[in-house]
Image: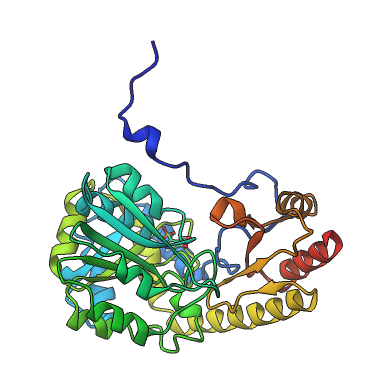
Amino acid sequence: MPIEFAERIRRIPVYPVAGGYDLGEDIAMLASNESCFAPLGAVVEAAQRVIAGGNRYPDPSYSVLRGALADRYGLQPDRIALGNGSCDILLAAGEALLEPGAEVVYAWPSFSVYPHLAAASGARAIEVPLDADDRHDLDAIASEITVATRLVLICNPNNPTSTAIGLEQVERFLDGVSPNVCVILDEAYAEFSLALGDPYASIELLRRHPNLVLLRTFSKVYGLAGLRVGYALCGSVDFRVAVDQVRQPFYLGIAAQAAALEALRHQDEVERRVERTIALRLALEETVRGLGVWVAESDANFIWLHLPEEAVEEDVVRGLAERRVLVRAGGSLGRDGALRVTVGTEGENERFVGALAELL
Ligand SMILES: Cc1ncc(COP(=O)(O)O)c(C=O)c1O
């Protein structure tokens, strides 16, 4: 007789993971919105140094890293939640907030992990279509909030469509949300946004909205996706306490903590890399548009394009992989006939554009 699993195991969607990690060196990995820049030497050294003390568990209060983030953002350390990637905080939020009878509201297509939260908890997921420009429709989202709503997720800039909405819209939306409903503003890509201007302006909103949580990560701008460090800036201590309550105490290893801490000390270089990524993105968008393909106005480190009608998404993705370029098919992310392509190095972007031109 097979093992009998919990009912929710049948409900939880399988996350559309990227393949290609076994394909060797010469492959343009443009499928997971990682940074194309390797971690800084000082960051690697900081992680290596602490491994010598690996016989000890990490400090379960993560006081040094939380303190550094608290200083950087001007918040008390007890309002900083950390996680094994920001996904860890998202899943913990689902566990802490949702249950059968509760509702979670988010736009769709959006980040592939969001549907997992409802499926794992037995809550109802309300997926609100993006508007005609592939942007969040906050009025439509607001109209779906009911007494059963516990959590609203706003991804800004949105993954997979790369689009951002202005902070004044978010502010107006928050003013209309009841304070007992938690709103997570997922800002994994905020630093890459030109539309948002100051990527830290949202922090001000925390002062007026204790139900707001800003979700951020070291995976994108800091280029530490493989180390797994995410954080949340919380409008209230309660959220941080609740997400810590549902997890094991040691969710963040010592090397990851040391790397993140060191990365924070090199903000100038991090910002230079962000600027370089934006320049590469603008060039990539322009070249792809030059092929006659519709590309969304990207505010992230990836682009989102709609394939011409005659193109078959599967064939294009396969053809790109045969040319050693891995991208993400829109179909696996909620929209057929689209592609999500991470901004790579100049060479990787050229390889992608050359291969796409051949295939179209
Ligand atoms: C919108 C969004 N939020 C959160 C994450 C999670 O990032 P991590 O768990 O690496 O911090 C991602 C990763 O791609 C993302 O696209």
Which sits in the foreground, 249 or 98?
Answer: 98
Q: What residue lies at 55% left-to-right and 75% top-to-bottom?
A: 133
User: Could you say which quadrant of the image residue 325 lies in?
Assistant: bottom right
On screen, residue 291 above or below 249: below
Q: Is residue 188 left or right of residue 357?
A: left
Which sits in the foreground, 238 or 291?
Answer: 291
Can residue 72 be seen? no
Which sits in the foreground, 301 or 76?
Answer: 301
Question: In the image, ligand 1 is in what quadrant?
Answer: bottom left
Q: What residue lies at 35% left-to-right and 68% top-to-bottom?
A: 141
- Residue 82 coordinates in the image, percent (x, y): 28, 62
Which sits in the foreground, 100 or 201?
Answer: 100
Can residue 5 be seen? yes
Quadrant showing the N terminus: top left
Most distant residue in the right direction: 358
Q: Is residue 133 left or right of residue 283?
A: left
User: Could you say which quadrant of the image residue 258 lies in?
Assistant: bottom left
- Residue 214 coordinates in the image, percent (x, y): 31, 72
Quadrant showing the C terminus: bottom right
Q: What color scheme is it?
A: rainbow
How many marks overall?
0
Q: What residue lies at 49% left-to-right and 83% top-to-bottom?
A: 271
- Residue 286 coordinates in the image, percent (x, y): 72, 81
User: Could you say which quadrant of the image residue 263 lies in?
Assistant: bottom left
- Residue 46 coordinates in the image, percent (x, y): 41, 65
Most distant residue in the top direction: 1
Q: What residue lies at 53% left-to-right and 64% top-to-bottom?
A: 160
